[in-house]
Amino acid sequence: MKCIAVTNEKGGVAKTTTSVNLGAALAEMGHRVLLIDMDAQANLTLAVGADPQQIHATILDIILDNVLSTEEILKPTGIEHLHLLGSNSGLNLAERLLPRQSGYETLLQKKLPFIGAKFDYVILDCPPFLGALMSNALAVADIALIPTQAEYFSIYALKNILALIRRIREQHNPSLAYRLLLTMFDQRNRIHRTLYQYLREHFADGLMETVIPIDTRLRESAIAGVPVLHHAPKSRAALQYRALAQEIIHHVQETLAQPA
């Protein structure tokens, strides 16, 4: 099982869009995928057509041992090989309750092997702030996938999440890798092209080759409550999310091939 934390302190950079469509692309390839919604806004839950009000337990309940079995709360999404651990507003309590626990930043690290044992990939859709939930996600992840726009404020905000990744590496998860993913990219926009080149020059191997374009089909699929791969399977965004899944798989295979 490999864990991918889709994360960024900045909101509106397509974290949830990336989580659901990367998950759908991996599932389409036959991999067993678990999506975990770690944001009380429950956008990932909504993105697969689930109702947050019908979610009776979240990742917080698992971390705090409020549920005895995970089987009953890991829900099928209606898409083959793709399951959901959803969210609701109760997850707002996490930032208050988790820091009261001893070693709180690694609580999920202890639980995820049991939650994700039947899956090939677990994708964590993180909240847009640097708190206890994000720290837990990074402490357990193999890869931190950081969606970012080719916009000044979005790129400027990277310094905070990268600083947190460095701290988590030093204290809890030395093998944590990170990759930047450029989203909502408009090739016709000169500023976008300039900032994309800046990212390529300054982050080199830390930048995914795949670029997610602006595509109205992504907004439509969110309203429909299905991944864009199912809403518009031949759209530009669907093709690029399939390419992203291939790139992630290649990274995982390279990592596994490295000697211990």
Image (cartoon, rainbow, N blue to C red):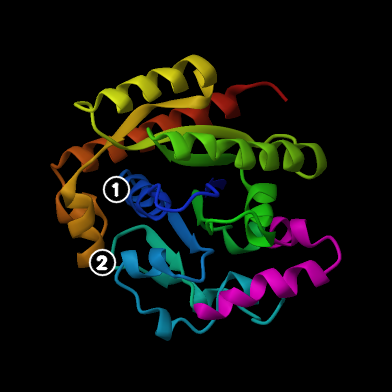
> How far across and down, in percent of the image, does residue 118 sit?
53, 58
Q: Which residue is mark 1?
A: 28
Q: Residue furthest right?
A: 102
Magenta segment boundaries in residue numbering: 89-111
> How far across and down, in percent of the image, does residue 18 sit?
38, 48
Name above or below for residue 129 compared with residue 84.
Answer: above
Q: Is residue 102 magenta?
A: yes
Residue 78 is drawn in which quadrant?
A: bottom left
> How far across and down, in percent of the image, does residue 209 sit?
38, 24
Q: Nearer the viewer, residue 216 or 52?
A: 216
Q: Residue at x 51, y 84 (%)?
A: 56
Q: Earlier in the sequence, mark 1 or mark 2?
A: 1
Residue 62 is drawn in which quadrant?
A: bottom right
Relative side of 23 to 65, left or right: left
Quarter of the picture holding the C terminus: top right
- Dot 1 surroundings within 10 Å: few (below 14), some, or many (20 or more)? some
